[in-house]
Image (spheres, rainbow, N blue to C red):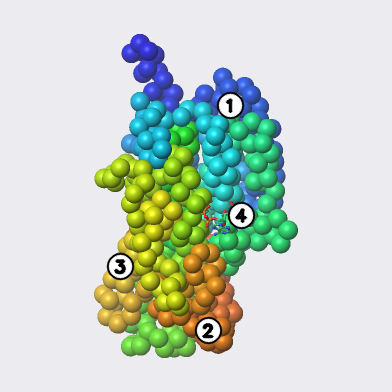
Amino acid sequence: MTENVSKEHAMNIMNVDYSTKIPNNVNLSEDRQVLKALEGWHPGYMNWWNDMGPEGFQQSLVYLRTAYSVDPRGWAKFDYVKMPDYRWGILLAPQEDNRVIPFGEHYGEPAWQEVPGEYRAMLRRLVVVQGDTEPASVEQQRHLGKTAPSLYDLRNLFQVNVEEGRHLWAMVYLLQKYFGRDGREEADELLRRRSGDADSPRMLGAFNEATPDWLSFFMFTYFTDRDGKMQLHSLAQSGFDPLSRTCRFMLTEEAHHMFVGETGISRVVQRTCEAMKAAGIGDPSDIAKVRALGVIDLPTIQKKLNLHYSLSLDLFGSEVSTNAANAFNAGIKGRYRETQIEDDHRLQNSTYPVLKLVNGEIRRVDEPALTALNMRLRDDYTQDCAKGLLRWNKIISLAGYDFKLTLPNVAFHREIGEFRDVHATPDGVLIDDATWNKRNSEWLPSADDGDFIASLMTPVTEVGGFAPWISPPKVGIDNKPGDFEYVKIET
Ligand code: BYC
């Protein structure tokens, strides 16, 4: 390439072409076949958005960010937009020159620009599973607009929703461009399955659970979106370069989703502590007294945390998995921060300690590192989750309360993997069925807890107002002031 041509190429990658119906930086206007397939899929997507996207507010002007470039120095612009007019685009991070496959049997070989035939089915399956989670989360959250605690939160919900929609587009692009006819069929199926549907559910467990209230939403965006972060990081290492580039850009957007979760929970904890202090309550476990103040007591926050963390652990699959080993060997799915790990990146002879059930006890057992990759990623995830707890606990201790939010033991409340057939307390003590049945509402939200939280979920739609169970954020979105009208609700 001459210098000019390569500069022009770099510009195209950085800036998004908005001239086609589908904004993109993948030169769709010259890829007629894929453009046609995507344009054919578009009406079905809009039908899905109208049926299963946010309930109400579709004609409201929402202050949203839209990606207009993939330049990390400035990739999004904020403006008022009606959600159905959001420009869902296809954006891939810039191609790295001479990128090589960073792990597995093909370690050091040039990254693939086309699907390697022998790994086609495996790759398609991973793209479909990833794609399936995106619309699922929008479906799970579709009712929440009606009970938003502020316009700021309402806007954040919708930002998360439109971006999950874009992530669906990202996976559909890969399916339609690289997997031909069966890719197109899978793309249609992604619009057909429904979260929680008895006949046609979403593929992974946590994406069929309800998100009944805003505390659940914050827990979901903290814990479940963080599984997304870990999985996207692993796929961003992929030797299949278009998948890697797609996931790298998705991660830019994902950071905000976890911010919404972390700060959302911080603000709930903050408000509860302030209210307890103001009322002179010394014991945060005096649930009745705390609830009488119209805030969510810390033990109930812990129960919600137990639920969402354990559901999210299930998303890592079994601790010992040949699927994970095969995907790694093939160069399709790597480890978290693979390129920064100092080892042979092949893992043929190494081991990794896995938590297993041995003679009725939870023990760490060395397993071949290749089959233990899900466990390793889950460990990385747990470490990442712990950071938020440090922040939340700091708020509690600064308020002078002796109460600590904790992550439950990995054996607690599991449906997938080593511990799916046993019951354990959040401290990791194995218990029998009868004890579990008697005591599980001490550790997981009960119907009463749900009713109480639901009773607080009255919407606040005046500009600058906040529901009394949550503190205002420290800073506004896009540095906007506290009285900014993030959503102009149509009357
Ligand atoms: N529920 O060897 P195994 C996100 C199935 S979130 C139901 O144990 P493997 C987001 C598994 O499919 C990130 N089924 O596990 C967040 C397999 O079935 P088949 C989404 C499950 O394959 C918030 C069988 O059990 N992305 O982005 O090593 C908002 C044995 O599997 C579950 C990905 O997950 C479950 N929880 O790992 C929006 C990345 N777990 O094939 C978005 C792509 C396992 O025998 N997916 N099974 O019929 C993967 O990497 C892997 O498929 C999994 C499972 C990590 C999910």
Which of 195/465 is in front? 195
Badge 2 density bin: few <14, some 14–19, many ≥20, Cα 10 Å = few
- Three-letter code for the amino acid on which mark 1 is drawn: Thr
Q: How far apart are marks 2 and 1 (CA)?
A: 60 Å
Residue mark closest to the camera, 2 vs 3: 2
- Is 477 situated left or right of 175 in this image? left
- Three-letter code for the amino acid on which mark 2 is drawn: Asp
Which of 294/13 is in front? 13
The tag earlier along the polypeptide, 2 or 1, is 1
- Residue indicated by mark 4: 203
Residue mark closest to the camera, 3 vs 1: 3
Query: As drawn, which residue projects farthest toward the right?
Result: 199
**Badge 4 vs badge 1, beta-carbon distance below 8 Å:** no
Badge 1 density bin: few <14, some 14–19, many ≥20, Cα 10 Å = few
**Badge 4 vs badge 3, beta-carbon distance below 8 Å:** no
In the image, residue 267 above or below residue 200: below
Does mark 4's beta carbon lie closer than 8 Å to ligand 1? Answer: yes
The tag earlier along the polypeptide, 4 or 1, is 1
- Residue indicated by mark 2: 432
Q: Which mark is residue 390?
A: 3
Residue 340 in the image: x percent, y percent? 29, 44
In the image, residue 407 above or below residue 93: below
Residue mark closest to the camera, 2 vs 1: 2
The tag earlier along the polypeptide, 4 or 3, is 4
Q: Residue at x 56, y 87 (%)?
A: 434
Q: Distance between the residues labelled 4 and 3?
A: 32 Å
Helix or strand or loop: what does disc 4 sit on?
Answer: loop
Q: Which mark is residue 83?
A: none
Residue mark closest to the camera, 4 vs 2: 2
- Residue indicated by mark 1: 20
